[in-house]
């Protein structure tokens, strides 16, 4: 008796409102002579979805009774769930049948209509709608959508087909975490030679591509300006700078910047500022975080430039001696 549903990205479609001398048959089903059950459908979806998370829509179908005679639409009665009596005092029959709602995802939304091609396949869910009354049903969770703009459309069918407006949502690109470590290549009486290495986090299921540019500063604060060292493609989540040095006594720092280079699933991101201090008696390497990072891995050993010098590492607030070098 009831037709299948077609689900499209939809917002709200309101049916059977206001006085009616002639019922809109496109959204209504004849209950008995002179009385119709009229349907509307609304949907609700989160407006922003983080990359890698599942998206899910909720559709609500509402049914009201409407008369052919010129009079206001009768709102649903809470108890009993039946259409109100007709002017002659007779009760029409009650409809309470299982039908379906079809959910569809598209590549965007233009006002009330979806844009672009459909993404994935139809998701058909059963729903039982009392007349008058309302009922809701959830779509199946959908994972794996790339960053971009989309929309849901939901379609209800029950001898009539009611299509809701498209409801837009956005899958947001991810901001990767960039962690860096200063490495010692060699040491001599002229000072240490060092390079920086970076790891860039990825969201599971979404390949991370791009490059990391390394900047070297003649101070410990990564500002105001530095010298470009090198740029390296990210391979398996890692990139490495060329070497710098030998370094004379003084304060230095590295800053790594990730550029997704057209990979729309990711945003650009900076790593923490890592400072390197070279003294005449002690060479100390510390890492200073300029922005919150979930994981910091300051592992650095710089051999001193003179005998009996101490190499220290101070991640966060702790300082520990990692070795003693005697020339």
Image (cartoon, rainbow, N blue to C red):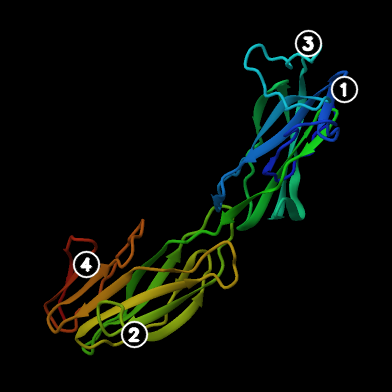
Q: Is mark 3 on a helix, strand or loop?
A: loop
Disc nearer the start of the sequence (3/2) = 3
Side of 139 where 24 appears, left or right:
right
Q: Crowding near pointer 3: few (<14 within 10 Å), some, many (20+)?
A: some
Q: Any mark on residue 1, and which? A: 1
Q: Any mark on residue 154, and which? A: none
Q: Is mark 1 on a helix, strand or loop?
A: loop
Q: Which residue appears at 60% of the width and 54% of the height?
A: 170
Disc nearer the start of the sequence (1/2) = 1
Disc nearer the start of the sequence (3/1) = 1
Marks 3 and 4, how far apart at CA: 85 Å
Marks 1 and 2, how far apart at CA: 73 Å
Disc nearer the start of the sequence (2/4) = 2
Residue tagged 4: 313
Q: Do the residues labelled 1 and 2 touch (CB within 8 Å)?
A: no
Q: Which residue appears at 88% of the width and 18% of the height?
A: 33
**Which image quadrant is residue 296 in?**
bottom left
Q: Are marks 3 and 4 in contact (CB under 8 Å)?
A: no
The percent position of residue 27, horizontal first and vertical second, equals: 81, 33
Which is in the foreground here, disc 1 or disc 2? 1
Q: Any mark on residue 225, and which? A: 2
Residue tagged 3: 91
Q: Nearer the viewer, residue 247 or 305?
A: 247
**Which image quadrant is residue 199 in?**
bottom left
Marks 3 and 2, how far apart at CA: 82 Å
């Amino acid at each position: 008796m009831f037709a299948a549903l077609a689900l499209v990205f939809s917002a709200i479609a309101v049916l059977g409102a206001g006085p009616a001398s002639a019922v809109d048959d496109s959204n209504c089903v004849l209950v008995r002579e002179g009385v119709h059950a009229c349907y509307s459908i609304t949907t609700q979806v989160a407006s922003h979805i983080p990359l890698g998370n599942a998206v899910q829509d909720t559709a609500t179908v509402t049914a009201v009774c409407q008369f052919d005679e010129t009079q206001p639409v009768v709102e649903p009665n809470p108890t009993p769930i039946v259409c109100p009596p007709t002017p002659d005092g007779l009760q029409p029959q009650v409809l309470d049948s299982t039908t379906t709602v079809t959910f569809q995802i598209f590549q965007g939304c233009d006002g009330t209509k979806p844009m672009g091609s459909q993404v994935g396949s139809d998701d058909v869910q059963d729903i039982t709608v009392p007349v008058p009354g309302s009922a809701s049903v959830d779509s199946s969770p959908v994972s794996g959508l790339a960053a971009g703009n989309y929309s849901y459309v939901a379609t209800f069918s029950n001898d009539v087909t009611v299509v809701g407006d498209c409801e837009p949502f956005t899958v947001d690109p991810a901001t990767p975490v960039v962690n860096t470590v200063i490495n010692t290549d060699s040491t001599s009486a002229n000072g240490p030679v060092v390079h920086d290495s970076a790891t860039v986090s990825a969201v599971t299921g979404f390949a991370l591509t791009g490059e990391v540019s390394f900047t070297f500063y003649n101070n410990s604060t990564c500002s105001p300006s530095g010298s470009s060292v090198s740029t390296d493609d990210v391979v398996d989540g890692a990139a490495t700078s060329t070497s710098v040095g030998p370094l004379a006594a003084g304060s230095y720092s590295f800053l790594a910047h990730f550029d997704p280079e057209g990979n729309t699933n990711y945003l650009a991101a900076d790593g923490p500022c890592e400072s390197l201090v070279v003294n005449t008696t002690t060479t100390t390497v510390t890492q200073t975080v300029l922005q919150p990072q979930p994981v910091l891995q300051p592992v650095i050993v710089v051999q001193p430039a003179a005998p009996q010098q101490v190499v220290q590492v101070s991640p966060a607030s702790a300082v520990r001696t990692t070795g003693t070098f005697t020339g």
